[in-house]
Image: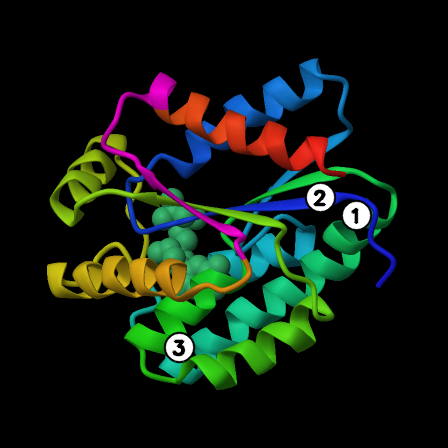
Amino acid sequence: MAKKGILISFEGGEGGGKTTQIVRIRERLAQAGRDVVAVREPGGTAVGEQIREVVLSSKNTGISFTTEVLLFQAARAQIYREIVIPSLKAGKVVLMDRTRDSSVVYQGVVRKFGKELIEQLNNISTQNTYPDLTFLLDVPVETGLDRRAKSGEVNRLDMEAKNFHEQVREAYLDLAREDKTGRWVIIDARKPLEVVEEEIWQKVEEELSTK
Ligand code: TYD
């Protein structure tokens, strides 16, 4: 794919502050004169938001893991075709609140579908698109769940046992540490918001300067 823009993803377990940081980084990019688009997965498109409702609703306790795998991929296929790929072709900076690595961690490792299978599906959904930069906002599980409880938003996966969230955290750290592409940046998200924002911004500026 002829790609001129920059794709930056934010990943991590519950309560790492991804959404807050994306708002801040988006603002700073806009101030720096960049054309910026921010989206979340699952969701981000009209069809994707409907899929989000199905896959995350706490009412849908009967959803099978296989259905879950495919629904996340379906939402992804839509957002890459409708927003991500066209935006990158137009030279924009695209910020994503979760993308392919969420499926590798949650469905590939924790739900045990295997990383290889999930990456194959990811490649179909994204048309082989990878982030240029991926921030892992890492917090201990207790801290993350505490923050999440205070925010009052609880989805179907948040209701999983603590052990599930421990596995999510470890899987993310493994993925980031095993990475050979240099796209992963591990951020200690226990730090104050402003400090985390500054760390992210420095990396983003570095990335922008190389393009
Ligand atoms: P969301 O409400 O967006 O919360 P947050 O990103 O702040 O945790 O929840 C998205 C949930 O969906 C989250 O529990 C992770 C899960 N998820 C997957 O399991 N696989 C995926 O591919 C994606 C994109 C998300």
Circle 1 SS class: helix
Q: Is residue 56 visible?
A: no
Q: Amino acid at mark 1?
A: Leu
Query: Residue 38: percent from the left, percent from the top?
Result: 63, 37
- Mark positioned earlier in the residue sequence (3 or 1): 1
| Residue identified by numbered label 1 | 88
**Residue at (66% x, 23% y) in the render:** 29
Q: CA distance from mark 3 to mark 1?
A: 27 Å
Looking at the rendered structure, which numbered label has been put on residue 68? none
| Residue identified by numbered label 2 | 6
Circle 2 SS class: strand
Instruction: Work out whether residue 50 or residue 115 is closer to the camera in this orientation and state it.
Output: 115
- Mark positioned earlier in the residue sequence (3 or 2): 2
Query: Residue 3: percent from the left, percent from the top?
Result: 82, 53
Q: Is residue 189 magenta?
A: yes
Q: Amino acid at mark 3?
A: Gly
Q: CA distance from mark 3 to mark 2?
A: 26 Å
Q: Which residues are magenta?
A: 182-195
| Residue identified by numbered label 3 | 108
Mark 3 surroundings: few (<14), some (14-19) or many (≥20) residues within 10 A:
many
Q: Are marks 2 and 1 in contact (CB under 8 Å)?
A: yes
